[in-house]
Image (cartoon, grey):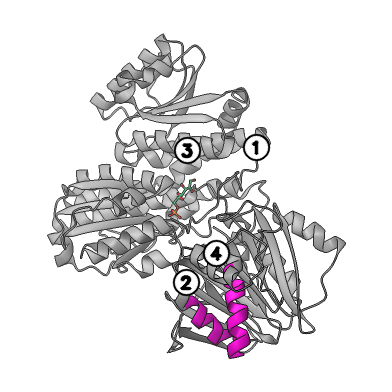
Amino acid sequence: MCGIVGYVGEQSASGIIIEGLRRMEYRGYDSAGIAMISEGSIVSDKKAGKLANLVDSLAENPLPKAQIGIGHTRWATHGPPNDVNAHPHLGQQRRVAVVHNGIIENFTTLREELESDNADLISETDTEIAAHLLERTVAETGDLTTAMQQVCRRLEGAFTLVAIDANDPERVVAARRNSPLVVGLGQGENFLGSDVAAFIEHTRDALELAQDQVVTITRDSVEVTDFDGTPATGKQYYVDWDLSAAEKGGYDWFMRKEIFEQPEVISDALLGRHTPEGTLQLDEVRISEGELRDVDRIVVIGCGTAHYAGLVAKYAIEHWTRIPCEVELAHEFRYRDPILTRNTLVVAISQSGETADTLMAIRYARQQRAKVLAICNTNGSTIPRESDAVIYTHAGPEIAVASTKGLITQLIACYVLGLYLAQVRGTLYGDEIANTISALGQMPDKVQAVLDDAETVYQLARDHIDASSILFLGRHAGYPVALEGALKLKELAYIHAEGFAAGELKHGPIALIKEGLPVFCVVPPKGRDQLHDKMISAIQEIRARGAKTIVLAEAGDDSVKPFADELIELPVVPTILQPVVALIPLQLFACELATLLGNDVDQPRNLAKSVTVE
Ligand code: F6R
């Protein structure tokens, strides 16, 4: 949700900033802009729409050379996406330029205050307020760092601010509260970014900042303070993925590349988490075994796709541990006064680690003295830092806005957590755990087998290019798969899609079924006879009413064939692990259909990755 870049060094700032914005564009693409300091003045350009518009504008009217600057790619909150509302915003004297991610909640009061003091505000954004306040304060203090500290003390809400002062061409000053910001540590140059992808080309040494900190970078120094000016230190870390992970590698879309990376990232997510004999070892879970034995309730929270990972987790965790497990959307959980005790384990699932709804929910849970365990992909992000424990999913950077490998590795982490809890609490025998670990170990090959047959799914997409509505049905762990299949289609192909629990069909949704309506049906493996047979009954019911059934069932399940207009065969896996293989065709279908429709698969309309506003 808004991408931010800052640079100071010896290289051409515009090149570095535009390149950084290209890698940040997945965070928002309503507008893009740049501001730099050249010969004591702010030089700036900004354009509504994708970064390409800014690049074209700069090609036509190049900015003077500079070695310090800031850049922004926007996901609009205050004010529509036009040139005026695009960032950077400048103070009235054009002395200070600011980019911002987040929402300044007391912006109306601050705006009124500035307007009553003759400020000429030209945009509808909250950011321009910060630019004016900073410029006024820097005029008094003469120092951008001090001004940033003072202004941040007045701001409410969530924000990352990055600013430059025309009178001080050596420094970029930034601040963060509840919004992401990392520092890239170079030689004779330093960087700022919403995440490390902004500077991964130049350095893999990064500095993580805590909440309510201000950072000042020059070519040779990085200084951190809190909002009161008290010196602080960031936590340095090394980024363990390289530039190629942030490139498309020959694929047309990041999303397609990320789908095809899934066998590899499943292996990475399992790496080092069990002994060869199948005993789990989760070194990073800093909650003692005693505390885990005392857990009497688990609440899994997340948003969107991560919430669906939680729905799968519930089936696995309750089955393996017999601990009651609820799953809730983080934003609903946070504001309904949920009952939590010190024996409640809250599992927060978030690919980005920055989702504001999830972050606010874990803060609330910890205030109520519940233990929080994060399942997260992004090292150094806020949610794991504010949790009691973390299981990193090791999916590598997920650039496409729609989550794919992020979800699959969340599932793996949830399974690992469920088995670990079962091990600690003795609810499964060692050989049962070892067998499931062994089944998980086979998942990369099973997923690869589904990917090897991508062409079958692509053909299906070609056959459904004119579909205006598609439904998805599942049961048990296949129900979240149905929900995710529908979400992927909505967000990428922009067509009506809904996922239902197959058992719910007859309670209402069956009224939607009409001649020719495509319905994806996720059939549980045959081993679970009852579930399997009930799903077949549901398929018969919709087929009798004219639906066109696209059935996902395990290879060799001949019983489904008479009722399948189209059949996608899935590898044979245990029921509880089936989502890992069943999700893959649905990801491929949405990606391909959106491609055929001419949509931007990596940057679907109205969306942004990493939703850092509530
Ligand atoms: C859908 C999608 C979103 C995210 C959701 C949570 O494809 O990507 O629904 O899953 O915004 O994001 P994280 O996992 O970063 O908290």
**Residue 148 visible, this orientation:** yes
Q: What residue is at 64 percent from the left and 47 percent from the top?
A: 253
Q: Position of residue 10 (x, y in %)?
A: 73, 83
Amino acid type of the residue tagged 2 in the rendering: Leu
Residue type, numbered disc 1:
Thr
Which numbered mark, 2 or 1, is in the foreground of this view? Answer: 2
* Residue drawn 45% across the image and 26% down it: 471
Which residues, given as a range, are shown in magenta? 129-152
Chief secondary structure of the magenta span? helix
- Looking at the image, tell me whether mark 4 or mark 2 is earlier in sequence order: 4
Residue beneath disc 1: 595
On the image, which quarter does residue 64 sit in? bottom right
Ligand 1: does it lie within 8 Å of the C-beta at label 3?
yes
**Residue 272's spot in the image, x, y percent?**
36, 64
Type of amino acid at the residue the image marks with label 4: Asn
Mark 4 — residue? 101
Residue 180 visible: no
Q: In the rendered structure, which amino acid carries the disc numbered 3?
A: Leu
Q: Tell me the number on the disc at residue 487.
A: 3
**Quadrant position of the N terminus in the picture:** bottom right
